[in-house]
Amino acid sequence: MDMISLTPKLEKESESPLYDQLYRYIRKQIEDGALAVNDRLPSIRQLSAHLLVSKNTIEAAYQQLLSEGYLQSRPRSGIFVLPLEQLPVASVRQMKEQPSQEISEQGRAGTIDFEYGDVELELFPVKVWKKCLAEAMDDRLHEVVGYGDRQGHLGLREEIARYLFQSRGVSCSADQIFLSAGTAQAISLLCQLLPLTERIAMEEPGYNGARAVFVNHLREIVPIPLEEDGLSIEALRGSGANVVYVTPSHQFPIGIVMPVQKRGKLLQWAYEQGGFILEDDYDSEFRYQGQPIPALKALDRSDRVIYLGTFSKSFLPGARLSYVVLPESLADTYREGLQNYSQSVSTLIQTAMYLFMRDGGFERHVRKMRKLYQTRHRTLLRAIHDQLESRVGVIGQKSGMHLLLNVIGRDCEELIQLAAQRGVQVYSPMKHWTNPADCPRSYIMLGFAGLQEEQIREGVSRLRQAWFE
Ligand SMILES: Cc1ncc(COP(=O)(O)O)c(C=O)c1O
């Protein structure tokens, strides 16, 4: 494309940073069709010279567009515009207009389940995914019939490395990436194959799925209390552990986004301790307020972070596909340990995911889902504000696919029962506390990713009737 056609009016005096102005300008050009699919963008150097702004500014704007799936970087050829897949017309209409009679009735009649872990299926790109599966079977049968690479499909690992760099700022090679069939299995292998110490520190509360695996591998868990900005570094220092499992981008289940200053302190702890941080970055694609904060792994200068990623939120839990990125110093030990194991992810799924990522399908899907979940998230917050007003507190509302309600002065058992009588299923998050009795009884966890807007509104309205009328 002709570089000169990129002529944003960048205002240096504006409150909005230059990179943000440029990012918004290019995004609008794409959305308006002024930049067409497969148009190649000028290189960072060219555009920086053309607009007379620093390369960092251009890079930051490109980075944001890459992470949101507007652009794709193709090795050795440049940065290109990806197709903007519109939401199917019917769904758009359902989202914008008043819900149809049919949906309202359906919503009212059926049980509304706020279970955490569900993902939206209606917008799942069935055709594209089927095509990837078929292509894997037709053209790559040799790849999918055997056990496959122990570490995981090389092409897929390269795609993951590229994706991590673009979306999370993590710089790693495919050699450092190991695939596994879910986060629990990844943690289990880490416990088996690496010299992780006996004592593991964990945020309290923290993900019960991870805790269970540590406990089953006879690790002693040291619960570390949370402060407003994430786990207490002081308590961590006093814990005697030199491995910690954390969810810095979206603390599970409380929802704290750890600010960059605390990330620095946590890394400092690991450097001083010669310890390791297990960073579980399970749902970082879905952040709705503010700019994405780079992963801890992206800030790690001394290779102390073991990064855990999963496709369960960004794609499908049923794919059973996750990965770890190991520090270079641990990769060989782990690889050696793997000699006695086979890769646990189906080779068919690995190859199909490779094709899906290679052709831009995954980035498009994530972008589409981010928009959709953001709408649902907003709808849920609005419904809570309108219907439940000051009778509840909302905890952890910046990102993710769930939030917590604090139904002040009430007890979860009663709340769950009353909700069930009105056809709404809600849950207590208590299983995520080391000692479940420590979980405040007034907490209720709402997962919203698998519910349509109308169901969310109807569900919250029923909660008001159930709890307060
Ligand atoms: C904190 C956390 N990590 C990871 C996962 C995903 O686990 P898996 O990759 O096994 O589906 C979840 C899912 O609920 C989670 O809450």
Image (cartoon, grey):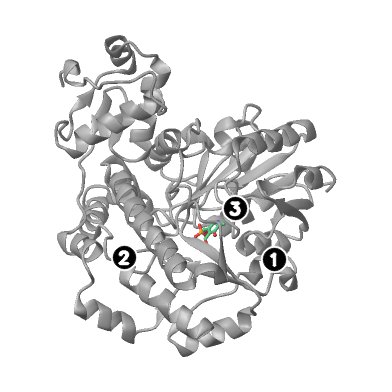
Residue wearing tag 2: 121
Q: Is residue 143 visible?
A: no
Secondary-structure class at tag 3: loop
Identify the residue at image location x=52%, y=62%: 403
Quickly name the residue at label 3.
Answer: 251
Front residue of this view, candidates 407 and 114: 407
Residue 133 occupies which quadrant of the picture? bottom left
Determine whether, in the image, residue 316 is placed left or right of residue 243. left
Q: Crowding near pointer 2: few (<14 within 10 Å), some, many (20+)?
A: few
Left or right of 244, for residue 349: left
Q: Nearer the viewer, mark 1 or mark 2?
A: 1
Q: Is residue 9 above or below residue 191?
A: above
For the residues bearing labels 1 and 2, Cβ distance under 8 angstroms: no
Q: Amino acid at mark 2?
A: Leu
Say if disc 1 is inside 8 Å of ligand 1: no
In the image, residue 363 lies at what x, y percent?
32, 44
Query: Type of residue at label 3?
Result: Gln
Q: Determine the CA span between mark 1 and mark 3.
A: 13 Å
Marks 2/3: CA distance? 25 Å
Disc 1 secondary structure class: loop
Task: Say which of 430 and 94 sits in front.
Answer: 94
Disc 1: which residue:
433
Please tell me whether mark 2 or mark 3 is closer to you in this view.
3
Taking 56 as reference, is 200 left or right? right
